[in-house]
Amino acid sequence: MWLRASLVVLIISSFSSFADEVHVAGAYSTDQLRGVRAGYRVTNLPIEMPTWLGSPSLHLEAALNHWQDSDNTADNITAFTISPILSWQIAGAERPLYVEAGIGGSYFDKTQIANRRLSTQFQFEDRVSLSWQYSQSSNARIALGYTHYSNADIKRPNDGLDFLWVSWVLPF
């Protein structure tokens, strides 16, 4: 798994010239799945959000995920995800705290891992997180979040996947 995770990070970092931020995350699910996520985010989109939404920032994020069954490390699954993300600053001026949410699409390389049956390779990614800029001298952040993957009952069974994750975000 670590070889694949390193490859994921290397591939994503090669796209960094197109992005404003890169991130690396570790994820775990109560279904005994563990994994990594590496991605990039474009933050300077020329779209202004309506004030009735609370004036969030809109970002576009792409990521590569790889998870494996903790009980059977040969059982793994990989997904490519692209998602718009809304980000609201909720506290702090010097070291801000953000709430982020997004719904996007994912393409999985297969439709089953462990006892979870997804039925379709296309899945929606729903996510929410807290992101904190921990230093005044750096724009780097730590984020803690929850992500759910599901095909919205396009086809059954629709077991879905749920992950808790922590990530390190590096803007440049």
Image: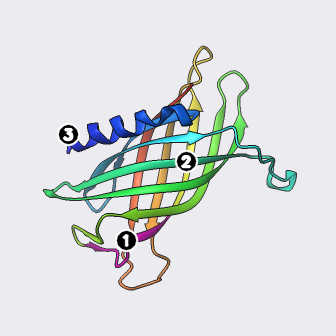
- Direction from residue 108 to residue 141 in the image, left or right: right
Label 1 with label 2: CB-CB less than 8 Å = no
Disc 2 marks a residue whose amino acid type is Glu
Q: Which residue is mark 2?
A: 61
Whether residue 76 is situated above or below residue 36 in the rendered picture = below
Membership of 118 in magenta stretch: yes
| Lateral position of residue 133 relative to residue 15, left or right | right
User: Which region of the structure is painted magenta?
Assistant: 116-125
Label 2 with label 3: CB-CB less than 8 Å: no
What's the residue at 56%, 55% (across, down)? 83
Name the secondary structure under disc 1.
loop
* Residue 23: % across, % down: 46, 36
The tag earlier along the polypeptide, 3 or 1, is: 3
* In the depicted structure, whether residue 35 falls above or below residue 120: above
Q: Residue at x 33, y 57 (%)?
A: 29
Q: Earlier in the sequence, mark 2 or mark 3?
A: 3
Q: Let me know if residue 30 is in the magenta part.
A: no
Residue 63 bears which disc, if any? none
First in sequence: mark 1 or mark 2?
Answer: 2
Indicate the amino acid at tag 1. Answer: Gln
- The percent coordinates of residue 73 (x first, y second) are 14, 54
Mark 2: few, some, or many residues within 10 Å (few <14, many ≥20)? many
Q: Position of residue 172 (x, y in %)?
A: 57, 25
- Location of residue 162 (image quadrant): bottom left
**Can you tell which mark lies on residue 3?**
3
The residue wearing badge 1 is: 121
Prevalent SS, magenta region: strand
